[in-house]
Image: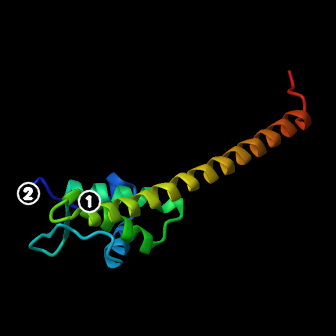
Amino acid sequence: MDDKHMQIGEVAARTELSLRTIRHYEETGLVTPSARSQGGFRLYTESDVQRLMAIRRMKPLGFTLDQMRDLLDATDRLDTGADLNSDEREALVTRVRTYERAAAGQVEKLRVQLTRAEDFAATLRARLEQNAPAARS
């Protein structure tokens, strides 16, 4: 096998995604294996791994599968850059900018949630310290 290709198990380990999740992303059109082995096994490249990592990062920010697909399409088209006129390029940049703003907004919401969770955990620790039986000598 060409060492530029990885089987799904290695990709799962590298991305910390389950085999089932990777297959689901394939079924929904978010990622496509770059090749198949003679035995029919999915083969992925480093580019495929990076795409899966981008999807993994979008998930906790609440992006839907359709939004992920749209964003990946826009970034793919911008990355290739071929045959884009200035209006098309600007429209793609605007799409990506919209998603960037949505991601930044979600990050801020998650920061607030994390702060609240940390405060709650600290409150519980303080209660435990107040009410824990004295250590025996």
Where is residue 39? Give x, y as percent. 12, 74
Quarter of the image for residue 48 reads bottom left
Q: Amino acid at mark 2?
A: Asp
Residue at the location (71% across, 42% down)? 118
Which residue is rendered at x = 31% and y = 59% of the image? 51
Q: Does the image show residue 17?
A: no
In the picture of the structure, the residue carrying the numbered disc 1 is 78
Image spot of residue 79 (x, y percent): 23, 57
Residue in view at x 32 percent, y 65 percent: 74
Q: Is residue 127 left or right of residue 22?
A: right
* Circle 2 SS class: loop
Name the quarter where the N terminus is drawn.
bottom left
> Residue under circle 2?
2
Left or right position of 95 against 104: left
- Outermost bottom residue: 27
Location of the C terminus (image quadrant): top right
Q: Residue 35's quadrant in the figure? A: bottom left
| Amino acid type assigned to the residue bearing label 1 in the image | Leu
